[in-house]
Image (cartoon, rainbow, N blue to C red):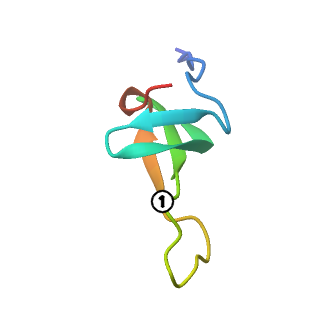
Amino acid sequence: MSTGMISKPKFSQDQSVRFIGGKGKVKGLNSEPGGWLYMVEMEMGPEPEMGRIGYETTVVLSEVDLLA
């Protein structure tokens, strides 16, 4: 029987990260067979005239797509 080792995640909850297309904060992470996936909440741009209901976008990115 073989056991796979799960590597330690490179980024942590609420850590600020950069990626192609923007910046954001890690809001969640999941271990996957190929590595870690991160749910990143993108930074909000300027508030529009009609106001804002919530955060604009959350993206799911792999560890190789992120920079501290």
Residue 63, given in percent of the width and then of the height, sits at 44, 29
Residue farthest toward the right in the current orientation of the protein: 13
Does 18 sit above or below residue 49?
A: above
Q: Nearer the viewer, residue 63 or 4?
A: 63
Residue farthest toward the left in the current orientation of the protein: 20
Residue at x 60%, y 18% (from the top left corner): 8
Q: Nearer the viewer, residue 44 or 36?
A: 44
Q: Nearer the viewer, residue 9 or 31?
A: 9
Total number of numbered labels? Answer: 1
Residue at x 51%, y 25% (from the top left corner): 68
Residue 19, given in percent of the width and then of the height, sits at 38, 37
Residue 10 visible here: yes
Q: Give SS at disc 1.
A: loop
Residue farthest toward the bottom in the current orientation of the protein: 50
Residue at x 58%, y 42% (from the top left corner): 25
* Residue corresponding to mark 1: 45
Residue 32 visible here: no
Residue 46 located left or right of residue 28: left
Residue 45, given in percent of the width and then of the height, sits at 48, 59
Q: Amino acid at mark 1?
A: Gly
Does 38 sit above or below residue 50?
A: above
Instruction: State the quadrant of the N terminus.
Output: top right
Does 2 sit above or below residue 43?
A: above
Residue at x 52%, y 58% (from the top left corner): 44
Residue 59, given in percent of the width and then of the height, sits at 45, 52
Does 18 sit above or below residue 5?
A: below
Neighbour tally class for label 1: few under 14, some 14-19, many 20 plus, Cα within 10 Å: few
